[in-house]
Every structure is written in structure tokens, then in C-alpha cells.
Image (tube, rainbow, N blue to C red):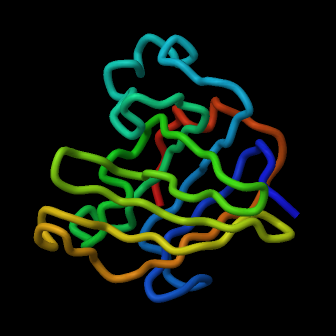
Amino acid sequence: MGFEPGTYQLQVCRPSCPGDPLVMGYLVLLDQVLSPADFPDSLRRDVSFGLLDPGGSTNACFSIVRRDPNIDTYAGIDPIALTHWDGPDSIIQFIRFYSSADAGYVARLHATPNGFAGEGHSWGFGYGRGKSGPAEEVIGHRLGAPEPGRCYKRWAF
């Protein structure tokens, strides 16, 4: 069992899912590079192109929303962005859901029969230099083939 390109419904929960998710949305994993040109003109100004994978290839995108804008996780600060995924067949080593010069959110995921599961952490700025926030469970249910269009639709909880 391994990861395959596709569209996944994503949840970030603390301490575990299912439950009352902190963040929900869609993650799309592709087997090709996704560029800003793939997004509508009206959205290009809003998407954090390249921010989440400086120097790498962007082969994934997401559209996520935070249940509460004041919640203490960095996942979802960027509601729509391009990112990168790779790793052995059954593990995505790290996927970024937020990144700045002094803080970020990263998850390590493993494949499950219906999608993925793993753990994510906020790190930096508000937590202190070199420190991480509490562990959060990150799960995804595979919906089907890659649909990059899900990454540029804003939606509410």
C-alpha cells in the first residue's frame, strides 16, 4: 500500500480524529508539477506560490479552512497554497501546510487503505525558537483522481 496521486479530504485534529477538527479541507497530490499558471488569474494574487516549498517542485496543492481564526495551530494560516510531497511509497516524509521565515507547520504522513494518517506540528515564532506546538493528528480520505480545481475554491466550515 502506498500513496497515489489523488484528491483527499483532509482533517487536522487535536488530540485525535475523528472528533472536532481544528482544520478541514482538501489536499491534492499530483504526479506532475503544478504552476501558478494552472490557477485562474483572479486567484494568483491570493495563493502563496512557492512559499511552502522554496527551491522545490510544487506537485501538490491544498484549500483548507480553520474552524476558528484564533485557534493555536499554524495549519490553515495560508488557506490556499502550493506545496510538495515525496517520500518512500508508503510515507510522505514531510508536507508543509504553512511556512514563514520563523515559523511553520509540517506533517509526516503514512498511507492507509483509504487515504493517509499521520502527525503534524506547528513550530517557531509563538512557540519559541526551536520549539514545537502540541502534536496534532492529520488524516485524509481519498476521494478519487487529482482535481486541482479543489485547491482554488474557498469554502467555510
Q: Residue drawn at (49%, 63%), measured in percent from left and top? A: 107
x and y percentages locating residue 1 in the rendered image:
88, 64
Check the image and report above or below for 152 versus 40. below
**Residue 42: percent from left, percent from top:** 41, 15
- Residue farthest bottom in this picture: 15
The residue closer to the viewer here, 116 or 44, is 116
Name above or below for residue 52 compared with residue 42: below
Residue 124 falls left or right of residue 58: left
Please name the residue shown 53% across and 31% down the image.
58
Estimate the x, y position of residue 101 in percent, counting from the top left. 18, 45
Tell me: 92 left or right of 113. Answer: left
Image quarter of residue 30: top right
**Count of numbered marks:** 0
Task: Give the quadrant of residue 115.
Answer: bottom right
Residue 71's place in the image compared with 105, above or below, is below
Q: Which residue is drawn at 63% across and 46% down?
A: 86
Residue 123: horizontal and vertical position, in percent? 26, 66
* Nearest the eye: 53 or 25: 53
User: Against 108, is 142 above or below?
Assistant: above
The residue at the far front in this view is: 88
The residue positioned 82% from the left and 59% from the top of the image is 2
Left or right position of 111 against 126: right
In screen coordinates, is 65 left or right of 127?
A: right
